Amino acid sequence: MTIVKGGHNICGVSIGVLSLESYFPKPPGHIKNPSSLSFTTTYEVIEGLTVPKLLNNPTPEMIEPLLDAAKRLKASGVKAITGSCGFLALFQKEIATAVNIPVFVSSLVQAQLIHQMTARPVGVITASKELLTDKHLSGVGAADVPMVIEGLSDTEEFAEVILHNARNDMDLDKVEAEVIEAGQRLIAKAPDVGAILLECTDLPPYAHQLANALSRPVFDIITLAEMVDRAILRRPFSGFTN
C-alpha cells in the first residue's frame, strides 16, 4: 500500500506565477501563456497592480499583496515561484524570504550567471531603460554585473500597449520588429556583448528571431523557469548505457 500525502485542492503544479493585471495578448513564449510551457503552472493575479504602476510608481504598499499572493501559491503546493514582470526585481528578496521555496520573480536573476559564462558584458533589453534602476539590479544581486542596456520606451506599438496601457489589442509583427531593432542598436554600440538577457516577460515570444538576428544566445524568464523546473522536479533519464 502506498500512502500519498494530501492537503492540496489541485495537484501536479510545478511553478506558480505572481501575475500583474493586464489584458494585452500573451503569445506562445509568454510566461502567462501556459500552452507553450513545458512545465505546469498556476497563477495568482494581483488585481490593480499593472505594468504602468509597477514601472512608474513602485511603492512599499505593493509588497504586502505580493507576499500574500506568494504565500497562497506556496500553500497551493507549487515548488517554485516566478513573476510576470521583470521589474518585480525590486521585491525579490522580500518574496524569497517570505516563502521557503525557490523564488525568481525577474529574469535579471540570471545576469551574474550569464556574465560568468561569457566573461563579457551582458546585453539587457528592457521595457524601459529609464525606469530600470540600480535598486532593481541590487534586488537580484546584479548591481556589479557589466551591462549594456537598451529599452523600448521610444517604440510605438510596444510602448502604447504595454507601457501606457492605451489599448489591449496589439500588432505582434510590429512588436517583433521593434524588439529586433532594439537588439541591433544594442549590438551596434556594444559589439563585445556576449549574450542577450530579456528583462521583460513580454519579449520571450520573439527570442528565437532575436537570437538569429544578433547571433547571440538569448536568455529570458522562460530559460530560467525551465532550468528551475528541471531542478525542483528531477525526472529520471531515459537513455541507455551500452
Image (cartoon, helix red, strand yellow):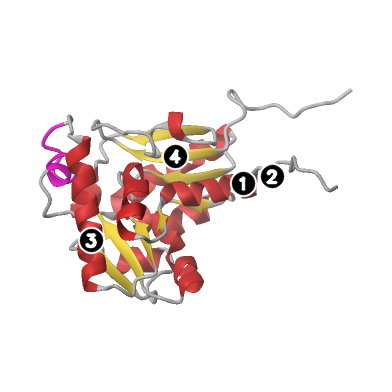
Name the front one of labels 3 and 1: 3
Image marks 4 and 3: residues in contact by CB distance under 8 Å: no
**Pointer 1 residue:** 230
Task: Report how far apart the C-alphas of labels 3 and 2 lie in the structure.
Answer: 38 Å
Residue 193, how many percent across, how many down?
A: 34, 71
Q: Say which element carries label 4.
A: strand
Q: Is residue 188 left or right of residue 73?
A: left
Image marks 1 and 4: residues in contact by CB distance under 8 Å: no
Q: Quadrant of residue 13?
A: top right
Query: Which residue appears at 54% of the width and 36% of the height?
Result: 39
Q: Which mark is residue 126?
A: none
**Pointer 3 residue:** 184
Name the front one of labels 4 and 3: 3
Name the front one of labels 1 and 4: 1
**Pointer 2 residue:** 234
> Closer to the camera, 212 or 91?
212
Name the front one of labels 4 and 2: 2
Amino acid marked by disc 1: Arg
Task: Report how far apart the C-alphas of labels 1 and 4 lie in the structure.
Answer: 17 Å
Give the mark nearest the N terminus, 3 or 1: 3
Amino acid marked by disc 4: Val
Task: Report how far apart the C-alphas of labels 1 and 2 lie in the structure.
Answer: 6 Å
Q: Say which element carries label 2.
A: loop
Magenta span of residues: 157-167
In the rendered image, the quadrant that contains the N terminus is top right
Q: Which mark is residue 17?
A: 4
- Number of marks present in the image shown: 4
Query: Which residue appears at 58% of the width and 24% of the height?
Result: 10
Mark 2, Cα crowd under 10 Å, few <14 / some 14-19 / many 20+, is few
